[in-house]
Image (cartoon, rainbow, N blue to C red):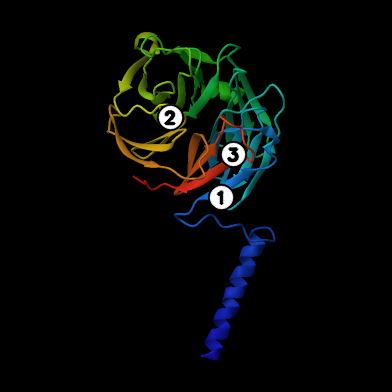
Amino acid sequence: MRSSRLISLIVLALTAAAAVVACGGKPAPAGPPPNATQVYTLDPPTHRNPEGIAWDEASRTFFVGAYNDGTIYRGGLGDSTVRPFIEGSPGRSAVGLKVAAGRLYVAGGIYGDVEVYDLATKAQVGTFTTGQGGFLNDLVVTDTGDVWVTDSVRPMLWHLTPDQIKAGRGNPAPLPMAPEIEYRSDTNLNGIVALDAHRLLSVRTLDGKLFRIDLDPQAPQGRTITPVPGPDISGADGLLIDGNRLVVVSFAGLTLLTLDSDARTATAGGKIEDPSFRSPSTVAKADTRYLVVNADFSKSRSPFTVSSVATRSTA
């Protein structure tokens, strides 16, 4: 018995030592327990309010953008503090973020630009401008490599082709959203997701209404826009597709909607609320967790944080 116990202890010790070596001399921090909330603090807080977030499965890290100067933070699920990965500067903003094929895509808010970074080198490998007078709020990268960007002021989506992304330059093409989607003086189209390479779904912040956008070069203006009946979520911001679940972020938390097979209707499927939420703006999924950005624009309190919550519904 003693001999067997000693052998077991030796095996455990060797396994632990191997794990330490594999992690570069120290064990990787563990993520939160399955149903617990974890809060990540952005340090330093001087870059001000966070806005966008993206999860990178390849590196097992997430990226958070600062609205005020475009700084990009990076962190892991086991971290408690998230630090700058790409430093920002005055005259820049990081609003919508997405990761695809080793690149980080950033929508630049009032500055009207889309920036693309190589995650391996941090090098900026693409810059695209739509000019002044709009607000580039969110973006999505489809399976074909096309990039679609919402503009909350100008009644259009902006399109970047895979060839433009490869070249790192080119003029984004506008896709009109009017007259089917009425644009008003307040925030209009905001969050956007791709249901497939030719079908997008976006939300209007002003009243929380959803719109399905079918891309079709043969259709008038190159698209067909269909309102999606469902609960109106005032102040709707970011969107996330999780299977047939649509996660809608608003200042109140996460509203879960179930889409039918053709995305023609959306039905209520519960809510996720948490005491750590402070005026959330958007969400990304990492494994069985939702990473929720606490934009906190109403009070601009410090520290600024991201909340990690389980994907289960609380209602």
Mark 2 or mark 1, whichever is nearer to me: 1
Is 176 in front, or is 310?
A: 310
From where the camera sits, is residue 169 visible?
no
* Coordinates of residue 241 in the picture (x, y in percent): 40, 36
The residue tagged 1 is: 77
Give whichever of discs 2 and 3 has the lower sequence position.
3
The percent coordinates of residue 258 (x first, y second) are 31, 36
Tell me the amino acid under the disc marked 1. Answer: Leu
Tell me which corner region of the image, top left, top right, bottom left or bottom right, holds residue 210. Answer: top left
Q: Which kind of residue does numbered mark 2 sit on?
A: Val
Query: Do the residues bearing badges 2 and 3 touch, measured as CB atoms within 8 Å?
Result: no
Around disc 3, counting alpha carbons within 10 Å, would you say few (fewer than 14), some (14 to 19), or many (20 or more)?
many
Q: Residues within 10 Å of mark 1 (few under 14, many from 20)?
A: many
Q: Residue 85, percent across and down?
A: 67, 39
- 239 over 37 or under it: above or below: above
**Residue drawn at x 56%, y 83% as measured from the top left:** 7
Disc number placed over residue 193 in the picture, else none:
2
Circle 3 — which element? strand
Q: Secondary structure at mark 2?
A: strand
Relative depth, front residue between 168 and 13? 13
Q: Amino acid at mark 3?
A: Phe
Q: Residues within 10 Å of mark 2 (few under 14, many from 20)?
A: many
| Disc 2/disc 1 C-alpha distance (Å) | 23 Å
In this rendering, the answer to whether 279 lies above or below 157 is: below
Q: Position of residue 267 (x, y in %)?
A: 28, 34
Question: Quadrant of the rendered structure where residue 212 is?
Answer: top left
Residue labelled with disc 3: 63
Q: CA distance from mark 2 to mark 3?
A: 18 Å
Q: How many marks?
A: 3
Q: Is residue 196 left or right of residue 277?
A: left
